[in-house]
Amino acid sequence: MPTFQPVRGMRDLIGEEAQAFTCIIRKARETAERYGYREVITPVVEPLELLSAKSGDEIRQRMFIFKDLGERQVALRPEFTASIARLATTAFKNEPKPLRLFSVGTVYRYDEPQRGRYREFWQSNYELMGSAKPEADAEIILLTNHLMASLGLHGYAFKIGHIGVLRGILSQENVDEKTQNAILQRMDKKEYEAALKLVESEKCREMLKGLLEIKGNSWQDTVEQIKDYLADYEKARQAAENLGEVLELVTQSVNLTVTVEPAFARGLEYYTGTIFEVYIPELDIALGGGGRYDRLIEIFGGDSTPAVGCAHGIDRIAIALQMQETSFDAKKGKRVMVVYITEALKPIALKIAEQLRTSGITVEFEVMGRKTSKALEDADRRKVAFAVIVGERELKDGAVVLKDLVSRQQSTVPISELLEKVKG
Ligand code: HAM
């Protein structure tokens, strides 16, 4: 009989890795609470049409698409944003703005599997809907910074740009939207030559080349240089101006390492404003990314609603934590194993286990029917802190034996004092 393995690009998370994920998800959820984001849970399977609108070729070509038994064209979600935008046009249609929503779960992309790149991966996702103001963009960046810092990551840096810079130039040079999208896809992958080949006008090509070369001494300097460079391109210049406003707000609130990329582009087509990614020096893949998308909700049939959001790759954050050897507080409480000497004592032993659990203690109950010595050996192997041994003799006095498996000392403890003793 062959043994089964997970599907290529998908993983079992076990042991410490599972613990790391749980911890990251907990921090992501705490961050959502801290910033006032309400959690929503949406389906993993969505209509193909919803997921493919404005996601961009890059993602469209990598979706898990299938027909369900009712002949519906569906797909596994490659991200959360489309589902949340759908909610904004349905359940939350009449909700007062701003609307802040958080989601966490698995998403699916048929990427080429490698370290940090999987076909099933986890994202924590935050969307802020209803504000076109720079403080909304700033909030999403600050929230990402908060999450990274609260996880104990260090040395991370933000790469920031504004999609309006490239789109502004291309639109003014009469490049149609489809070609713009194709150019931006290549720019996102740093395939600049291939991108420039798609530009017909020599003037436009030269403009883009010049933009790529801008490099300032600070983010302020870079933004100023971009603004000067775009003097004849009003829309693009306004985009750079907006980027400056967002960064001003962010950097006045926290200390952040920021690099402005003049020709920054992202694969997702729905972005209309600021775009960013966050990296640590040890890894050349982004730990998270996001940006402003002011037209998606309207495309889905909702009212015109400006929005900005981001998603963090939990699989990659777990790798980053490991690389930086960050030991996050798994807050492992002391574990207790409850064993009984004779069959007749099983019910009372189980009752004691339940009482401890209700009081917040992690308890493993002996379910293998082993001899006490064997059960204790196993408890030792699993690094359990205490064994509670329920025996006839002690029970007569309303007591049990509490054995400290680290110091190997044991004593008889009245059941009424057990909790106190275990908590130490
Ligand atoms: P994204 O940049 O496509 O944005 O993905 C966000 C993060 O997901 C990436 O920065 C990365 O950490 C992680 N990620 C992407 N692909 C993979 C993969 N194959 N394996 C492991 N991790 C991966 C979005 O998804 C947007 N929906 C973000 C957003 C929300 N924009 C506005 N609102």
Image: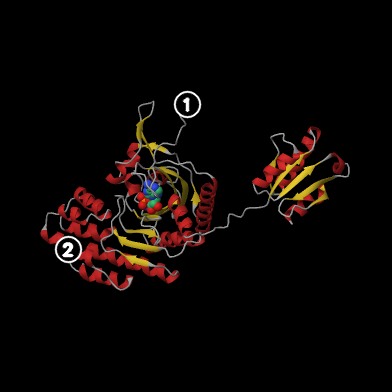
Image point (39%, 64%), residue name: 157
Q: Nearer the viewer, mark 2 or mark 1?
A: 1
Residue 42 at x, y = what percent?
A: 45, 41
Residue 122 at x, y = what percent?
A: 44, 47
Q: Which kind of residue does numbered mark 1 sit on?
A: Met
Q: Residue 380 or 387: which is nearer the viewer?
A: 380
Image point (28%, 56%), residue name: 265
Q: Residue 28 or 165: which is nearer the viewer?
A: 28
Image point (22%, 63%), residue name: 212
**Residue 87 numbered tag:** none
- Quarter of the image that includes the C terminus: bottom right
How many discs mark residues in the rendered view?
A: 2
Kindly identify which residue carries mark 1. Answer: 1
3D distance between C-alphas at marks 2 and 1: 63 Å
Residue 351's place in the image compared with 323, above or below, is above
Left or right placement of residue 225 versus residue 339 in this view: left
Left or right placement of residue 150 versus residue 243 in this view: right
Whether residue 81 is visible, yes or no, is no
Left or right placement of residue 254 versus residue 162 in this view: right
> Circle 1 sits in a helix, a strand or a loop, which is it?
loop
Residue 347 at x, y = what percent?
A: 77, 35
| Disc 2 within 8 angstroms of ligand 1 (CB) | no
Whether residue 107 is visible, yes or no, is yes
> Circle 2 sits in a helix, a strand or a loop, which is it?
helix
Q: Residues within 10 Å of mark 2 (few under 14, many from 20)?
A: some
Q: Which kind of residue does numbered mark 2 sit on?
A: Met
Badges 2 and 1: C-beta atoms under 8 Å apart? no
Identity of the residue furthest to the right in this view: 397
Residue 57 at x, y = what percent?
A: 27, 44
**Residue 207 numbered tag:** 2
Q: Residues within 10 Å of mark 1 (few under 14, many from 20)?
A: few
